[in-house]
């Protein structure tokens, strides 16, 4: 069926996408991508990265892929981040004119829940609940509700406090140092489920080579946990490390060269909120730490 909306119908690439010949996906560039980006903006979806220099840039990068996924999730379509027949048909229906949409986009439905517990031995530079709110905002974009089930200040003995002033380990998956193990066995385990993620706020985290870290997701396989340095300055540190747990030790690439992606390699994530790519989301939704909301 041919597209009817004047904002889409006059563009050959969008007409072809409506019949999957071909669909539009990541790394595509052109005016047709800019039309799609403007459509998402008109539907109330932020495109801060793509409009940083003015009008939509027409680059189908990580942010655009994320918005396509979110649009598909909110409208009951297959969530693949690709603009094909289903997505173009729904856009054509929701935006029949060049003007504003006649009705709002369906709200995000929380489909899954992630339970976390916070344990602190030091006051972090970015408060625990600030980092928690950032994490909730990031995952809420994708229908994941982050629930903080408990919080506790961990009281350690004098010799333990000294040992944990610098938690020393190489932050390798499934391998933890004695100090990491001490931290991850500290605090109450009451009501912590086997698939809940425990977040430990330490003082300083340092690899054996002396390099300091903002966080570390190394943990025993049976105890999902992360450590956050009290010196961490990136507000997304908790979300970033918890996401490592959700992605698992075999996911690659571990970090990406997109500063607005939650799993960026840069010291500070620039996303507000940070976004995730489709490959990352597919793995996250397969994690045992996510509980489907009935």
Image (spheres, grey):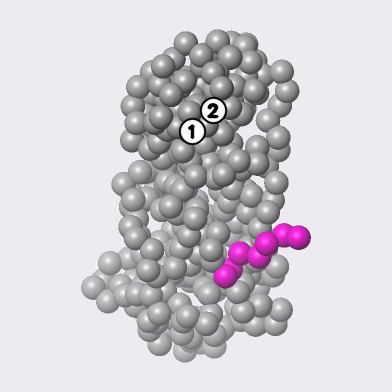
Q: Residue 255 carries which label?
A: none
The image quadrant of residue 169 is bottom left
**Residues in magenta?**
288-294
Residue 64 in magenta? no
The image position of residue 44, as x and y in percent, is 62, 27
Q: In this view, does 47 lie to the left or right of 255?
A: right
Any part of residue 120 in sight: no
User: Residue at 58% across / 36% down in the picture?
Assistant: 71
The residue lying toward the viewer, choosing from 80 and 263, is 80
The image position of residue 24, as x and y in percent, is 41, 32
User: Residue at 64% across / 49% down in the picture?
Assistant: 143
**Badge 1: residue crowd in 10 Å (few <14, some 14–19, many ≥20):** many
Residue 290 in magenta? yes
Q: Name the residue under label 2.
A: 88
Q: Are marks 2 and 1 in contact (CB under 8 Å)?
A: yes
Which residue sits furthest front? 1
User: Residue at 55% across / 18% down in the picture?
Assistant: 3
Q: Quadrant of the C terminus?
A: bottom right
The residue lying toward the viewer, choosing from 34 and 268, is 34
Query: Is residue 60 positioned above or below 76 on the image?
Result: above
The image quadrant of residue 59 is top left
Looking at the rendered structure, the secondary structure element under dot 1 is loop
Q: Name the residue under label 1.
A: 84
Any part of residue 150 in sight: yes
């Amino acid at each position: 069926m041919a597209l009817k909306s004047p904002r889409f119908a006059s563009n050959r690439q969008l007409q072809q996408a409506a019949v999957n010949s071909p669909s539009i996906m990541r790394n595509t560039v052109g005016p047709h991508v800019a039309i799609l980006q403007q459509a998402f903006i008109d539907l109330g979806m932020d495109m801060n990265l793509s409009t940083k220099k003015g009008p939509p840039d027409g680059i189908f990068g990580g942010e655009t892929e994320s918005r396509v996924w979110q649009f598909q999730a909110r409208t009951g379509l297959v969530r693949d981040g690709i603009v094909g027949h289903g997505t173009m048909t729904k856009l054509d229906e929701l935006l029949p004119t060049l003007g504003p949409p006649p009705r709002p986009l369906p709200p995000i439905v929380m489909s899954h829940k992630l339970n976390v517990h916070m344990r602190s031995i030091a006051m972090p530079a970015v408060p625990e609940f600030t980092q928690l709110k950032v994490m909730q905002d990031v995952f809420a974009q994708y229908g994941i509700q982050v629930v903080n089930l408990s919080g506790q200040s961990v009281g350690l003995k004098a010799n333990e406090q000294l040992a944990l002033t610098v938690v020393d380990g190489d932050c390798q998956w499934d391998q933890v140092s004695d100090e990491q193990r001490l931290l991850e066995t500290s605090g109450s385990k009451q009501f912590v489920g086997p698939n809940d993620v425990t977040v430990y706020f330490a003082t300083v985290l340092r690899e054996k080579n002396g390099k300091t870290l903002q966080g570390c997701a190394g943990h025993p396989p049976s105890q999902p946990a992360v450590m956050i340095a009290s010196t961490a300055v990136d507000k997304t540190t908790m979300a970033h490390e918890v996401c490592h747990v959700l992605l698992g030790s075999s996911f690659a690439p571990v970090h990406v060269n997109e500063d607005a992606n939650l799993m960026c390699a840069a010291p500070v994530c620039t996303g507000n909120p940070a976004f995730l790519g489709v490959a990352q989301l597919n793995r996250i939704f397969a994690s045992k730490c996510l509980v489907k909301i009935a």
